[in-house]
Image (tube, rainbow, N blue to C red):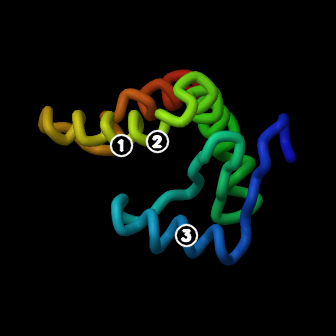
Amino acid sequence: MVQGVLEVHGPAAEFFLRRVVGVFLKGGASAITFGHIVLGRDQRVLEMTRAHERVHVRQAELWGPLFLPVYLGASLWALARGGRAYEDNFLEKEAFKKTR
């Protein structure tokens, strides 16, 4: 636990991030947030992405059970407008803006 968030890394987390998330996002993800749980490929990645993922933890607190549908909807909306599913998702934009 770090700052009230369970951070998980290891072979299963790395497989999920590379292979499962990789089906939807080219190259997979370095880390991903599910409520107060953050999966990372390894400890170093968790440390590097901590501030960014904490923004998603706060977003999940705000949206509650709607967070994942809102996230997916924001990606679809970005694609429908000719944008990119990850980079133009308003939740990702907020996380990058607050951690730069």
Q: Quick check: 17 above or below 93?
A: below
Where does label 2 land, which residue?
Answer: 68
- Mark 1–mark 3 CB contact (< 8 Å): no
- In space, the residues marked 1 and 3 are separated at their CA atoms by 18 Å
In the depicted view, which residue is nearer to us: 29 or 5?
A: 5
Q: What residue type is labelled 1?
A: Leu
Q: Quick check: 28 above or below 81?
A: below
Indicate which disc, 2 or 3, sits on the residue closer to the N terminus. 3
Q: Residue 16 carries which label?
A: 3
Q: Residue 72 carries which label?
A: 1
- The secondary element bearing badge 2 is classed as helix
- The secondary element bearing badge 3 is classed as helix
Judge left or right: residue 78 versus residue 48.
Answer: left
Q: Quick check: 99 above or below 87?
A: above
Q: Which amino acid does label 3 sit on?
A: Phe
**Which mark's residue is nearer the viewer, 2 or 3?**
2
Judge left or right: residue 64 versus residue 90.
Answer: right
Residue 92: x, y in percent? Answer: 44, 34
Query: Which residue occupies the extreme front position in the image?
Result: 65
Q: Which residue is drawn at 64% across and 34% down?
A: 57
- The secondary element bearing badge 1 is classed as helix
